[in-house]
């Protein structure tokens, strides 16, 4: 097995991604890999916001949430001596994660999941599941529960 040199951790800022973040940072440290911290502003969710609200203000708020979430991960990586870069993307989360990974020669994608099943997964979908299906790159899914 070749060592991972570039690891992508996708975060949504939730507490459920904490274990995935810990795994990604640990692997990056162990393998002296660069960590790419990716947050995707979900344009699908943004499109559903009522028209009478100022979209630019809402978008900036979502982007700020992403920067805040990524900063938490970047600070944790820095504490462990891991080289990390923050990337904020916009679009469909699964597609953006896979596209970024392909375009930047990422060796491993690490994602957290809530471990939903049945009707809950059917209704809400799973970014982790979509990334795992779409990605030509190895994906590690870390259960948050």
Image (tube, rainbow, N blue to C red):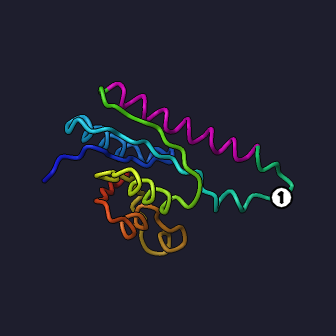
> Is residue 31 rendered magenta in the image?
no
- The segment highlighted magenta reads 57-79
Looking at the image, can residue 58 be seen? yes
Kindly indicate the quadrant of the structure image that contains residue 36.
top left
Observer-nearest of 14 and 103:
103
* Residue with the most extreme left position: 1
- Residue 97, position in %: x, y? 45, 56
> Where does label 1 land, which residue?
51
Q: Residue 109 location in percent, x, y?
A: 34, 53
Task: State the residue at coordinates (44%, 74%).
Answer: 118
Q: Is residue 75 magenta?
A: yes
Q: Residue at x 58, y 58 (%)?
A: 91
Give the total of numbered labels. 1
Describe residue 91's horizontal placement relative to residue 60 as left or right.
left
Dot 1, how many residues are within 10 Å of its Cα: few (below 14), some (14-19), or many (20+)? few
- For the N terminus, the image quarter is bottom left
The spot of residue 16 in percent (x, y) is 43, 48
Q: Is residue 145 visible?
A: no
Q: Is residue 89 left or right of residue 30?
A: right
Percent x, y of residue 55: 77, 50
**29 sits to left or right of 119:** left
Query: Helix or strand or loop: what does disc 1 sit on?
Result: loop
Q: Residue at x 37, y 47 (%)?
A: 8
Q: Which one is in front, 56 or 15?
A: 56
Q: Main secondary structure of the magenta part?
A: helix
Q: For this rendering, which residue is in front, 101 or 113?
A: 101
């Amino acid at each position: 097995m070749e060592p991972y040199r570039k690891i992508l951790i996708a975060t949504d800022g939730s507490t459920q991604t904490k274990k995935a973040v810990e795994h990604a940072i640990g692997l990056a440290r162990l393998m002296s890999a660069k960590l790419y911290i990716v947050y995707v502003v979900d344009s699908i969710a943004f499109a559903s916001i009522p028209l009478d609200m100022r979209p630019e203000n809402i978008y900036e708020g979502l982007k700020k949430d992403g920067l805040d979430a990524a900063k938490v991960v970047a600070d944790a990586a820095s504490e462990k001596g891991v080289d990390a870069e923050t990337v904020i993307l916009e679009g469909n989360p699964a597609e953006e994660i896979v596209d970024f990974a392909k375009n930047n020669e990422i060796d491993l994608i690490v994602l957290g999941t809530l471990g939903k099943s049945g009707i809950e997964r059917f209704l809400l979908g799973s970014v982790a599941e979509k990334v795992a299906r779409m990605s030509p790159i190895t994906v590690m899914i870390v259960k948050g529960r």
